[in-house]
Image (tube, coloured by chain):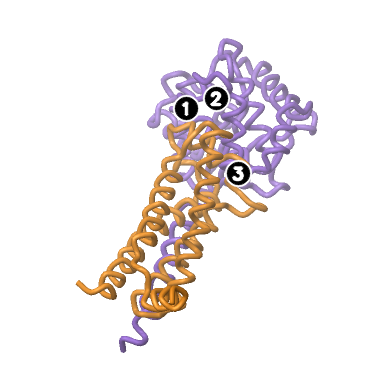
Chain colours: A purple, B orange
Amino acid sequence: MKRYLPFIIVAVVALATLGSGAMLYRAKRPQLLTIPEDKVLPGKGGAESMHIRGNPDAPVTLEEFGDFQCPPCGNIAVFIDELVKEYGPRLRLVFRNFPLPNHKYAREAALAAEAAGLQGRFWEMHDVLYREQGVWSKADNVRELFDSYAGMIGLNIDQFKKDIDEEKTKARVESDHERGDSLGVQSTPTVFINNRQLGPNDRTPDGLRASIDAALKQKS
Amino acid sequence: MTVSRFRTILYTVAAIVSLAGLADATYLAVQALTGETLVCGGSPDCFRVLGSSYAKVGGIPVALFGTLAYFSVFSFATFAAFGYVRARAFLILTIGAMFLVTLWLLYVQAFLLHAYCRYCLFSAAVTFLLAGLVIALPPSRESLESQDAQAS
């Protein structure tokens, strides 16, 4: 038996490592983030696209105009994400960039998210930008931090650095902003549910839930 | 305590220590493969290191190589503890290579990135501990006999 013991020990550790690695991978792999390219809806002019999280064909659309440097946007993003999971195929989230001029790095962050979107990782960048908002908002070299976020979420960093300065990236942010302007958006976060703008009191978890339920009722 | 028993204990300790490195490297490898960013939450230095181009070699996360290296150390140390002579040489070679790679990675963090990642420092500590254990190993009977033969 002793002759086989080292083989058994090594095999058990190999299996435990592979098993725990696979479980961790399943738990951490991105979900609901990547929408097939044909499901990315064209925005104004057809050149830009809007970012959808959830079921692209959902009956209710929650359209958020957000600024990555705005703290309330970071807070609302957390529970909007929970709502997308909670409502499953009945709700889709559309994110629109609306960087405010009084936020020093908001536009830069919007460009970073759009540059990530060009590599199919918009939502991963969206999440890390909001989660790390308190860190990069105070940073001296915000580009360097955005590059490191890009590396962490698995982007080609050189391509990301190139894309962030590209005209098409800027055009995407401008397009979102123009849409917000045309709808009378003045602050962030501004939320629309099936094209109906929510008041400040409706931007709470309960308020959002009630508005989504009402929109679902209308659709049925 | 006999020299042989002391060596067996050291190999066993090396195997146990390598499991800590294996867990750390596996966690980082999964993080790198999934693109999960919670691992670095609130630590810009961690992002600077794990999100840098040095964190991958040929598109493969360095942590994945670390997982393989720590698993090799665990296997060789286990076999060495059970008296497999050849496993001892492989163990020393593997730990030697890991030691050199760790020095390079510490240099990258200190002088190129100017940032440290706590998971990487933990891995470096584990590798240094493994190197210390290998250095503490008393010479085997075979190597002592060959030294005696050379002396006479």
- Which numbered disc, 3 or 2, marks the residue closer to the eye? 3
Residue kind at label 3, given as amino acid type: Tyr
Q: In which quarter of the image is residue A121?
A: top right
Q: Nearer the viewer, residue B79 or A137?
A: B79
Q: Is residue A105 above or below residue A146?
A: above
Classify mark 3: helix, strand or loop: helix
Residue kind at label 1, given as amino acid type: Gly
Image point 61% across, 19% down: which residue? A99
Identify the mark at residue A68; answer none if there is no mark: 2
Q: Is residue A43 left or right of residue A72?
A: right
**What distance separates the C-alpha of mark 3 from that of mark 2?**
28 Å
Q: Nearer the viewer, residue B141 or A99?
A: B141
Identify the mark at residue A30; answer none if there is no mark: none
Q: In the rendered image, which residue does mark 1 sit on?
A: A74
Image point 62% across, 38% down: which residue? A122
Image point 47% across, 27% down: which residue? A74
In the picture as drawn, the residue positioned furthest to the left comes out as B1
Q: Estimate how packed mark 2 is, as few (under 14), some (14 to 19) or many (20 or more) residues with alpha carbons within 10 Å.
A: many
Q: Position of residue B4 (x, y in %)?
A: 29, 75
Q: Is residue A127 visible?
A: no
- Marks 2 and 1: CB-CB under 8 Å? yes
Q: Give me the chain letter of mark 2.
A: A
Q: Give me the chain letter of mark 3.
A: B
- Marks 3 and 2: CB-CB under 8 Å? no
In the picture as drawn, the residue positioned furthest to the top comes out as A102
Q: Which of B89 and A189 is in front in this view?
A: B89
Identify the mark at residue B54; answer none if there is no mark: 3
Image quadrant occupied by the N terminus of chain B: bottom left
Q: Give me the chain letter of mark 1.
A: A
Both marks 1 and 3 on one chain: no
Q: Which of marks 2 and 1 is nearer the N terminus?
A: 2
